[in-house]
Amino acid sequence: MDARIVLLGAPGSGKGTQAKRLCKELDLTLISTGDLLRQAVRENTPLGVEAKGYMDAGKLVPDKLVIGLIKEKLDGLRGGFLLDGFPRNLEQARMLDAITEVNMAVELDVDENMIVDRIAKRRSCRQCGEVYHLVARPPKTPGVCDKCGGELYQRSDDSEETVRNRLAVYHEKTQPLTDLYEKRGILVTVDGRGSIDDVYRRMVDAIRGFKK
Ligand code: AMP
């Protein structure tokens, strides 16, 4: 059976980094609404123009904008996939149920004190979106992306105030989804502490174990 995974975790939990690697190595299609929205902002599309204000304030972009992105990506998709950053609230979870049936929800569990540090030291590539951490995963040359040579920058929504908002939104809107998926018997919680490799191994074990 193809893995159809929803990845849950607070901002700064390391979700995006793990999602990229899991998808590459387990041959899943990665759908990250955050990445898709940032791309739309970069390209100044009508969606990007509408979404930017919400993102910079650490708020959720309206459901109707995001669901369009998801539908477009899932339509006609073959094989397994992993959703990073979607669904973010119960309404989106319901909309997802109407499109497809997910068979696993993986929650990355981290200590919130870690989050502020992680986000403050996070840098992303303007060109390809690759994510670095100044200590845990520094680029070979400061300020330059290892993969494509693009310029590294700090996301505009990674300021301390916005991060606090994003955490509050996570607790209020997104965390209730763990109950939903737990009731369905498809929730796995993975300890998000430790090195990127440690967490990665735990996630792979959790996913493989679940599929057996
Ligand atoms: P992320 O990269 O997942 O941390 O997302 C960055 C920002 O994009 C969030 O703070 C929201 O403003 C927006 N965003 C990403 N995914 C969603 C979603 N599923 N629903 C609403 N807003 C989203």
Image (cartoon, rainbow, N blue to C red):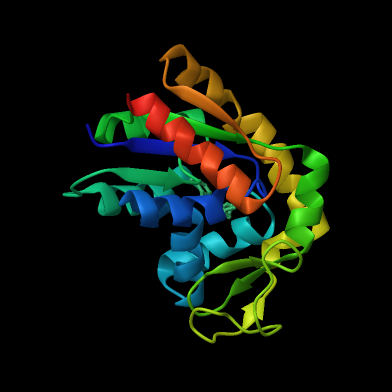
x and y percent of residue 205 in the render?
47, 34
x and y percent of residue 60 in the render?
58, 47
Q: Is residue 84 left or right of residue 116?
A: left
Q: Which quarter of the figure is the C terminus placed in?
A: top left
Q: Residue furthest top?
A: 183
Q: Is residue 87 visible?
A: no
Q: Is residue 208 left or right of residue 101?
A: right
x and y percent of residue 151 in the render?
61, 84
The part of the image, by quadrant, that contains residue 185 is top left
Instruction: Give the residue displayed 48% in from the left and 23% down from the top.
Output: 187
Q: Is residue 141 visible?
A: yes
Q: Is residue 108 left or right of residue 181?
A: right
Q: Which quarter of the figure is the N terminus placed in?
A: top left
Q: Nearer the viewer, residue 193 or 126?
A: 193
Question: Taking 40 as reference, is 91 above or below it?
Answer: above
Instruction: Give the residue displayed 48% in from the left and 61% down from the top.
Output: 35
x and y percent of residue 105 in the render?
45, 30
The part of the image, by quadrant, that contains residue 104 is top left
Number of marks drawn? 0
Instruction: Give the residue displayed 61% in from the left and 56% down from the top.
Output: 54
Instruction: Give the residue displayed 42% in from the left and 34% down from the top.
Output: 207
Q: Nearer the viewer, residue 97 or 191?
A: 191
Question: Taking 165 as reference, is 152 above or below it?
Answer: below
